[in-house]
Each structure stands twice: as structure tokens, then as C-alpha cells.
């Protein structure tokens, strides 16, 4: 929306237009305009864990210590489990503490998985913790937190 | 829009009972809904693949929910047990309802 005029007026008008566009865009984002805080992730984790106590251990997260490109960060999870029909990993939820949206992905394993191990590539906006929550067929829950340092963020244009 | 192309790597022959790895890739932009059109300042709407599913002779052996934080051209690898010969079917579901699919045959000896 460029209308010719003297330089000063165009600049102020442009700023107002851009800022209201940004505000409007922020309002229309599905989940909040600010980067998530650890508190938001804590709420999502609680939604998965419920009243159970999340134990540590059994989850091995393979993530780069330093990710050069936040747009594609390789992630591998391995959960220690016999993966039998009576004792297997049901789901693994991944959250990012400082992304625009807290959820990254959820993997659903079955006794036919053989191994509770899977890999994907995720976007991380900045240096932060990836929080992993694994739920087991016997109802127990495990949690892991791993930090990834990100040099170039990968969430926006 | 570029054509969305799924690719899978499944071993052709596996011994019964063996646990084998499946690798998948699909060419998809995974528009996160975070980017802005630099000229108009408007947010480019989200358009991602939000569900991945793998069925082995009809039974779901692995599936995943994907969110905007999954990278473009999503890669997904996982394992499954060689139970019997047959068909392994993969499906990727886009936000707009389109389902992309691919199948692979497997021989279990």
C-alpha cells in the first residue's frame, strides 16, 4: 500500500499498516503469538501424564548437541521395552519449550513394532529443551529432557 | 504447487521374526503457519501432513501425529517385526484431507 507523498507520512502510515497486520496475524495464529514458555509445555505434559508420576530413565534421546540448522534437526528416540503384547510402549510425545507451538510430534508404537525406536526431523526455533514423555501399556509414564543448542532458528521466514 | 511424492525403503526379503527398519520420506512443504508473505505481511496459512500411518497386511503397526514443527520433506523411520509375507501400506494425511499413499511388498521366509 504505497501512496506517494512526502517521505515522513508514508513511513508512519506504513508502520501502522504493518503493525496492525502483524497484530491481526498474531490473533489469527492457532496457538498464541509468543514463543511457548516452559510453563506452557508443562501444561501439555500434564495433559498426557495426568495424575501419574513421570519417572526418569528408559528413554534415550539422540539429538545433536548443537544444531546448525534449526529447520531440520534429526531426532531419534529409543525407549527400553520388551515390546511384547503385555508390555510395550504405547506412545511417545515430544514437546519443545521455546517453539511457537509446544507439540512437535507423537509416535504410536504397537507390540508389532519390535523396537520402540523411531527417527524424524524437527524444527526448533532456538536453543531449548526437547521434552519427551513415553506412556507404557501398563500405565506408567516416563519423561526425558534434552537440550539442543540451535545456531540458526528454524520456525519462521 | 510441487507434486507431493512419497518414497519408502522396505527390505524385499526378511526372515520371520526379524525386526527390520522401514524408512520413509515424502516431499511436502509442511507450511507451518509461522511464515509471513514478505510483500503483503500476511501469514501464509498452515498446511502440513498431520498424520502418518503404516499398516502391515491391514494392521496398523506404527503411526504418528505430526505438528507444524516437523521439518519440510518429512523423514520418518521406525521398526516392525517380520510376521508374514504381504503388503506394507503407508499413508500420509494432509490438513486439507488429501491422503497420499504408497505400498511395498515384502516376502517373509
Image (cartoon, rainbow, N blue to C red):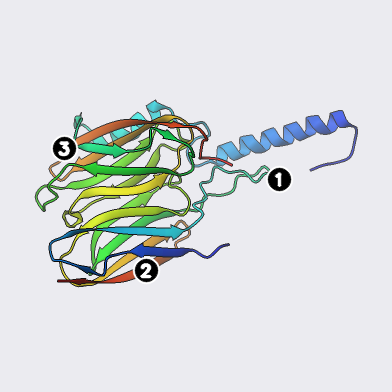
Residue closer to the observer: A149 or A85: A149
Coordinates of residue B71 in the picture (x, y in percent): 45, 48
Coordinates of residue B8 in the picture (x, y in percent): 36, 63
The answer to whether dots 2 and 3 both sit on one chain is no
What chain letter is assigned to the residue under label 1? B
Residue in the picture at 29% in, 38% down:
A61
**Position of residue A18 in the picture relative to residue B107 (left or right):** right
- Residue farthest toward the left in the current orientation of the protein: A86
The part of the image, by quadrant, that contains residue A72 is top left
Which callout, 1 or 2, points to the residue nearer the camera? 2
**Position of residue A7 in the picture relative to residue B97 (left or right):** right
What chain letter is assigned to the residue under label 2? B
Of helix, strand and loop, which one carries label 1? loop
Q: Is residue B96 above or below residue A129?
A: below
Q: Residues under labels 2 and 3: Cα distance? A: 35 Å
Q: Residues within 10 Å of mark 3 (few under 14, many from 20)?
A: some
Which quadrant is home to the C terminus of chain A? top right
Coordinates of residue A23 in the picture (x, y in percent): 62, 34
> Which numbered marker is on residue B39?
1
Residue in the picture at 33% in, 31% down:
A146
> Which numbered marker is on residue B102?
2
Q: Residues within 10 Å of mark 1 (few under 14, many from 20)?
A: few
Amino acid at each position: 500500500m504505497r501512496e506517494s507523498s512526502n517521505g515522513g507520512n508514508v513511513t508512519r502510515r506504513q508502520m501502522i499498516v504493518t503493525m496492525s497486520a502483524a497484530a491481526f496475524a498474531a490473533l489469527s495464529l492457532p496457538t498464541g503469538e509468543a514463543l511457548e514458555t516452559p510453563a506452557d509445555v508443562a501444561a501439555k505434559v500434564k495433559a498426557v501424564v495426568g495424575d501419574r508420576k513421570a519417572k526418569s530413565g528408559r528413554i534415550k534421546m539422540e539429538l545433536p548437541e548443537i544444531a546448525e540448522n534449526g529447520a531440520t534437526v534429526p531426532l531419534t528416540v529409543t525407549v527400553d521395552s520388551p515390546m511384547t503384547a503385555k508390555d510395550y510402549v504405547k506412545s511417545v510425545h515430544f514437546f519443545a519449550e521455546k517453539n511457537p507451538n509446544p507439540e512437535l510430534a507423537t509416535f504410536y508404537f504397537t507390540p508389532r513394532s519390535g523396537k520402540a525406536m523411531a527417527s524424524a526431523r524437527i524444527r526448533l526455533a532456538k536453543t531449548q529443551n526437547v521434552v519427551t514423555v513415553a506412556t507404557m501399556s501398563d500405565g506408567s509414564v516416563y519423561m526425558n529432557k534434552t537440550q539442543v543448542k540451535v545456531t540458526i532458528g528454524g520456525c519462521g521466514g | 504447487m510441487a507434486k507431493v511424492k512419497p518414497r519408502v525403503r522396505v527390505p524385499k526379503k526378511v526372515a520371520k521374526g526379524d525386526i527390520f527398519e522401514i524408512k520413509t520420506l515424502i516431499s511436502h512443504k509442511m507450511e507451518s503457519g509461522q511464515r509471513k508473505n514478505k510483500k503483503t505481511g500476511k501469514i501464509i496459512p498452515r498446511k502440513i501432513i498431520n498424520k502418518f500411518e503404516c499398516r502391515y497386511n491391514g494392521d496398523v503397526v506404527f503411526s504418528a501425529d505430526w505438528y507444524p514443527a516437523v521439518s519440510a520433506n518429512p523423514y520418518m523411520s521406525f521398526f516392525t517385526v517380520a510376521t508374514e509375507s504381504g503388503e506394507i501400506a503407508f499413508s500420509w494425511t494432509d490438513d486439507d484431507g488429501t491422503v497420499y499413499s504408497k505400498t511395498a511388498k515384502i516376502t517373509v521366509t
